[in-house]
Amino acid sequence: MPQLALIRHGQSVWNLENRFTGWVDVDLTDEGVAQAKHAGELLAETGFKPQHAFVSVLKRAIKTLNLTLEGLDKLWIPVEKSWRLNERHYGGLAGLNKDETRARHGDEQVRIWRRSFDTPPPPLPEDHAYHPVNDCRYAEVPRGLLPGSESLKSTLDRVEPYWTASILPRLRAGETLVVAAHGNSLRALVKLLFQVSDRDIMDIEVPTGNPLLIDLADDGETITAARYLDPKRAKPLPPLPGA
């Protein structure tokens, strides 16, 4: 039976500094490196044997995947990178301290920007350094697809076609996969996998560097079991579909 491991990148520099990050390409902290290595150890203890890996094009996720695969002695497996697995784009909030932003705009407004399903933060203009049209890694992406800001809904709209075209067919074929990505792009995958409602998905949080291991039936879609491998750092999971 196929398995799927979802791993949010280890702690990043801006996680530590309590800043909105999004598509800004910040690095892992020493703690984030340790979390990524531990993720590989935890997966190895279960006998997890991935055949293919998927990752965003941001270094904190790429380094997390590499460290995880090293712990599994699986650095040689094929890896597919896609911008569609990037974190949600935080628009004009990118780089801002979260506490300072609350003080400036109020708790309720920041809560709406962060936790509503379909309300994005203020967008960045295209001439801003943090807008992806100015980043060479997105040169092959049609300009109209590159966001200046995203809600969770628009993040889901970006992730879902990639899930359907690239990841799900491999699970249906019986492959065991690992995906290293970000809090909101993984939240989108959890929404699809667990059939979570638009309202309930806002209460789901994926912890950094703690693998979510999902056992699937032979059809590659029906979840038979799901668990975080480090119970001390686990977050509540939605009920299994049909439970």
Image (cartoon, rainbow, N blue to C red):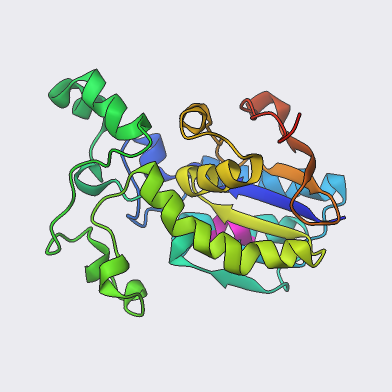
Q: In which quarter of the image is the C terminus?
A: top right
Residue located 48% across and 49% down the image: 185
Give the vertical position of 57 relative to 110 (above or below): below
Corner quadrant of residue 79: bottom right
Overall secondary structure of the magenta stretch?
Answer: helix
Q: Where is residue 242 in the image (x, y as percent from the top left)?
A: 74, 33
Q: Can residue 159 be seen in this view?
A: yes
Give the vertical position of 84 relative to 141 (above or below): above
Corner quadrant of residue 170: bottom right
Q: Where is residue 75 in the image (x, y as percent from the top left)?
A: 71, 68
Q: Which segment did they paint magenta?
A: 62-66
Residue located 51% across and 46% down the image: 188
Q: Position of residue 112 (x, y in %)?
A: 29, 28
Q: Does residue 155 appear left or right of residue 1 in this picture?
A: left
Give the vertical position of 146 relative to 139 (above or below): above
Q: Does residue 63 appear left or right of residue 177 in this picture?
A: left
Q: Does residue 199 appear left or right of residue 179 in this picture?
A: left
Identify which residue, 35 or 3, lies in the foreground: 3
Q: Where is residue 133 in the image (x, y as percent from the top left)?
A: 24, 69
Identify which residue, 198 or 19, lies in the foreground: 198
Residue, far front: 242
Q: Is residue 87 visible?
A: no
Q: Does residue 211 appear left or right of residue 118 in this picture?
A: right
Q: In which quarter of the image is the N terminus?
A: bottom right
Magenta run includes residue 197: no
Give the vertical position of 101 relative to 210 (above or below): above
Magenta run includes residue 63: yes
